[in-house]
Image: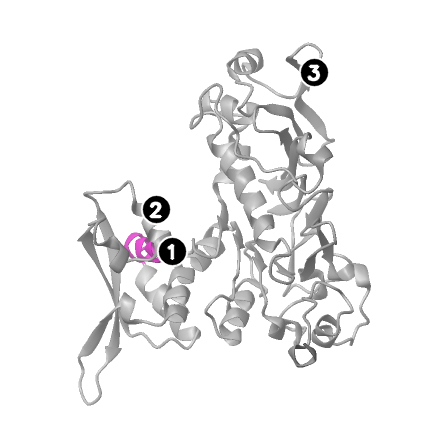
Amino acid sequence: MLVSFAVENWTCFRNRQEFSMETVGRVEDDFAFNTEVSRYPRLNRVATIYGPNGSGKSRFVEALAFMRDFVMESAGETQAGDSIDVEPFCFDSLSLEKPTQFEIVFIQKNTVYEYGFAVDNEKVWDEWLFVRPPGGRIQRWFRRSFDPSSGKHEWVFGPSFQGARNMWRTATRPNALYVSTAAQLNSKSLYPVMEWFQNLGVYRSDEVLSWFTSEFLMNESDGYARVIDFLNQADIQVSDIKVREEDIDLEMAGSLIRMGDMERLKNLAGQKVPRPEFGLPIENSDDLAYLDFNEQSDGTQRMYAFAGFWLDVIDHERVMVVDELDRSLHPHLAKFLIEFINRPNKTRAQLIATTHNVVLLQNQDVLDRNQVWFMEKDANQAASLVPLSDYRPRKKESLLRGYLGGRYGAIPNVSDPRLN
């Protein structure tokens, strides 16, 4: 369960920007769930981020992706002296000299973890982890801080953090995270942290790929029935799905699969790629006609790709972040995807999505006002992220009219071409 995420001095975010899934006021069960953690008793199921093109929405998604990837890979995928691919705010000379900071709060097995780090292109400047066990007080497990005068990191460990702490410290490179290094060296205490990040799904607009749903079909005992039912609920009429496996021919791949798939498959020469076919009924016949996946519309292909992700997120109570949720989709399909997560059930799955679909704001049975955020940039190109709740909209206020009318900001300031 994601509680909050903060980023500072990253691409278009000069000042610290804080995003939270905590509820404000009374929120119906359709939109929030109980965590069984007294510190954060209720969390939202969904959060949507609105804003004009170029406002920083995709950069926000990239920030979460960077944090996840750096936690998962810094100890194993990099070598001493390798540059860290971090981008500070570039429209301020002082920001270019400062590290970029990421901080996240999440709940794993009723334990609260508050973890963060600050990095530049050369090293990790700071890293810290605080843990609040069920029913207990917050504990500092460790903190490392770089001292420029000595050129070394200073370390502090708390008594509650168990294991070969000093050995892991010695093994941690300046350009790697202690959490990553210790977990790679079998720290059982940090396994829940790595497990949470491993289960965090962060997808740019071109990274929601069909292969995941195809693998879901083949690996889950009821995968075919559930995916077909998901598509039928979205008014995509499919009677059967066949998944055949083809050899990967990278020379021909550009005409067969999408660019996102190419990025994933570029190192898989000689292996197989799943290719779905949709079975549709033939009039006056009991047989089905099968259409190749590439014969489907972009929207149908995207809904098929979403199906496996959505069902898996529900099954395993994951957190999923999607950029441009409504890309190539009819507004009703985006509404369907939101409502699939936003419904009273026993799962604690969460969805964070950037979108331009203002139709979702028209009906407050689809999105609670707690679930709406706005992103915009100032004159200095610095982005800010603000929740709708900060504007204190009236109970029956039209959110759609208020947003399009500029009451909440985060809309493009376009000129009237008739006046030019």
Residue 252 x, y percent position in the rendering = 21, 54
Tag 1's secondary structure? loop
Colouring scheme, one of rainbow, by chain, secondary structure, one colour = one colour
Give the spatial CA distance, label 1 vs label 2: 9 Å
Q: Earlier in the sequence, mark 1 or mark 2?
A: 1
Q: Is residue 29 above or below residue 416?
A: above
User: Mark 3 is on which residue type?
Assistant: Asp
At label 1, the amino acid type is Leu
* Quarter holding residue 375: bottom right
Q: Kindly identify the residue that appears in the image at 30 percent across and 46 percent down.
A: 265
| 380 with respect to 200 (left or right) | right
At horizontal 70% and vertical 67% (from top left) the residue drawn is 413
Label 1 close to label 2 by CB (< 8 Å): yes
183 to 405, vertically: above or below: above
Counting from the top left corner in percent of width and height, residue 282 is at 21, 84
- Check residue 209 in the rendering and tell me which mark sits there, or answer none: 1
Q: Residue at x 61, y 57 (%)?
A: 54
